[in-house]
C-alpha cells in the first residue's frame, strides 16, 4: 500500500476540464455526494501535497540513516530500506519492537519532519473552496489520516480552515498498527460524530484509504491527480474516481 507521506507532486492548478467531461463527472457524483452528511478526508493528497517542498523520500532516508548510526542496519530488510517511504520504515520497526522507546523516537522524528513540511505544503486545487462550500451547505467534515494530527491542525489553521473540521481530526497515534488500511481513524471519526457509515463519504487518494473505507463500510471517492494514482486506486477496487475536485465543487454550488 502507498502511504500518506508519498505525495510529492506539486499541486499546481490543473488545466480546466472540458465542460462536457465535468458534466459527466457531476452526474456520476450526484448520488454519493447527496447521501454524504459526513465527509471524511484523507489529508496528504486530497487537501494538500504535504511534501511538495520537503521530500518524503529524504525523510525516509534520514530515518534509515538514523537507525544505521545506532548500529541497527539489520533491523530493516533491503526492500524496507529502499522503499523511500517514512511510514514503511516506521511500521517495520514497530512490528519488530512494538511500543518501544525506539519506535517512539522514530515517530517523533517523523512528526518533526511533517511539521517542517507544512510550511511548504501546496493546497490541492479546489480543496479550500470545496471544504468551505461543503461546510456551508450543512455537511460535517473530519480528517482521517496517517499523518500526525499536529500537522493537520497546523496546516488547517494556516489556511483558515480549522473551524470547518474542529474538533474532528483523527491522525496517527502511538498504536501504529492502527494506521490505514486499518479503519481505526475512520471509525473514531464516525463514532465521535454519531454518524452511520452509509451516511458518510471518504475522500482518499491511495489504496490504503480505499481499503480502510471498505472495511469501515464507508462509500469512497477516489482523488487521483495522475494516471498512475488512478491505476493504483482502480487496481485496489475503487470505482468512483476524479482527477480534480472541481466537479465536486460545481455540483455542490449548483445545489446551494
Image (cartoon, rainbow, N blue to C red):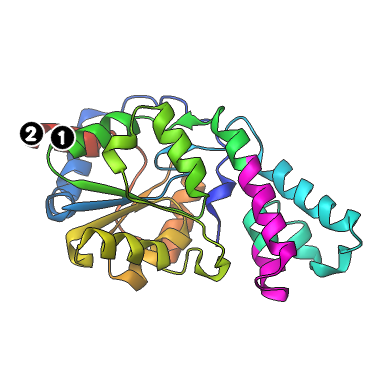
Depth check: 115 or 6 in front? 115
Please tell me the numbered disc located at residue 187. Answer: none
Taking 11 as reference, is 246 left or right?
A: left
> Residue 46: where, in percent of width, then height?
40, 42
Taking 224 as reference, is 189 left or right?
A: left
Q: Is residue 65 shown above or below 116?
A: below
Residue occupying the point 32% across, 70% down: 216
Outermost residue on the front side: it is 101
Depth check: 65 or 33 in front? 65
Does residue 237 appear in this view? no
Outermost residue on the left side: it is 255
Does residue 128 appear in this view? yes
Quarter of the C terminus within the rendering: top left
Taking 228 as reference, is 72 left or right?
A: right
Magenta residues, dominant SS class? helix
Residue occupying the point 21% across, 53% down: 38
Closer to the eye: label 2 or 1: 1
Quarter of the N terminus within the rendering: bottom right
Q: CA distance from mark 2 to mark 1?
A: 9 Å
Are there few (<14), some (14-19), or many (20+) residues within 10 Å of tag 2?
Answer: few
| Range of magenta residues | 91-113
Does dot 2 land on a helix, a strand or a loop? loop
Residue occupying the point 17% across, 61% down: 199
Is 96 inside the magenta-drawn segment?
yes
Quadrant of the rendered image containing residue 193: bottom left
Q: Are marks 2 and 1 in contact (CB under 8 Å)?
A: yes
Quadrant of the rendered image containing residue 129: top left
* Residue denoted by label 1: 136
* Residue denoted by label 2: 256
Residue occupying the point 46% across, 34% down: 155
Does dot 1 land on a helix, a strand or a loop? helix
Amino acid at each position: 500500500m502507498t502511504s500518506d507521506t508519498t505525495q510529492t507532486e506539486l499541486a499546481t492548478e490543473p488545466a480546466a476540464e472540458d465542460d462536457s467531461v465535468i458534466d459527466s463527472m457531476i452526474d456520476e457524483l450526484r448520488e454519493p455526494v447527496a447521501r454524504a452528511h459526513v465527509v471524511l478526508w484523507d489529508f496528504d493528497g486530497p487537501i494538500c501535497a504535504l511534501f511538495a517542498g520537503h521530500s518524503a523520500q529524504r525523510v525516509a532516508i534520514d530515518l534509515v540513516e538514523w537507525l544505521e548510526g545506532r548500529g541497527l542496519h539489520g533491523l530493516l530488510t533491503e526492500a524496507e530500506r529502499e522503499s523511500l517511504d517514512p511510514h514503511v520504515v516506521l511500521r517495520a520497526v514497530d512490528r519488530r519492537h512494538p511500543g518501544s522507546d525506539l519506535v517512539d523516537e522514530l515517530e517523533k522524528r517523523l512528526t518533526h519532519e511533517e511539521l517542517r513540511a507544512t510550511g511548504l505544503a501546496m493546497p490541492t486545487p479546489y480543496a479550500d473552496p470545496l471544504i468551505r462550500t461543503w461546510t456551508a451547505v450543512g455537511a460535517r467534515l473530519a480528517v482521517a489520516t496517517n499523518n500526525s494530527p499536529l500537522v493537520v491542525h497546523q496546516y488547517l489553521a494556516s489556511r483558515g480552515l480549522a473551524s470547518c473540521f474542529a474538533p474532528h481530526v483523527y491522525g496517527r497515534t502511538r498504536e501504529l498498527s492502527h494506521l490505514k488500511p486499518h479503519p481505526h481513524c475512520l471509525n473514531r471519526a464516525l463514532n465521535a460524530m454519531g454518524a452511520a457509515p452509509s451516511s458518510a463519504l471518504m475522500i482518499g487518494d491511495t489504496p490504503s484509504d480505499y481499503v480502510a473505507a471498505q472495511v469501515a463500510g464507508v462509500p469512497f471517492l477516489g482523488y487521483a491527480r495522475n494516471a498512475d494514482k488512478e491505476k493504483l486506486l482502480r487496481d485496489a477496487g475503487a470505482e468512483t474516481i476524479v482527477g480534480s475536485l472541481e466537479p465536486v465543487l460545481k455540483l455542490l454550488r449548483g445545489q446551494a
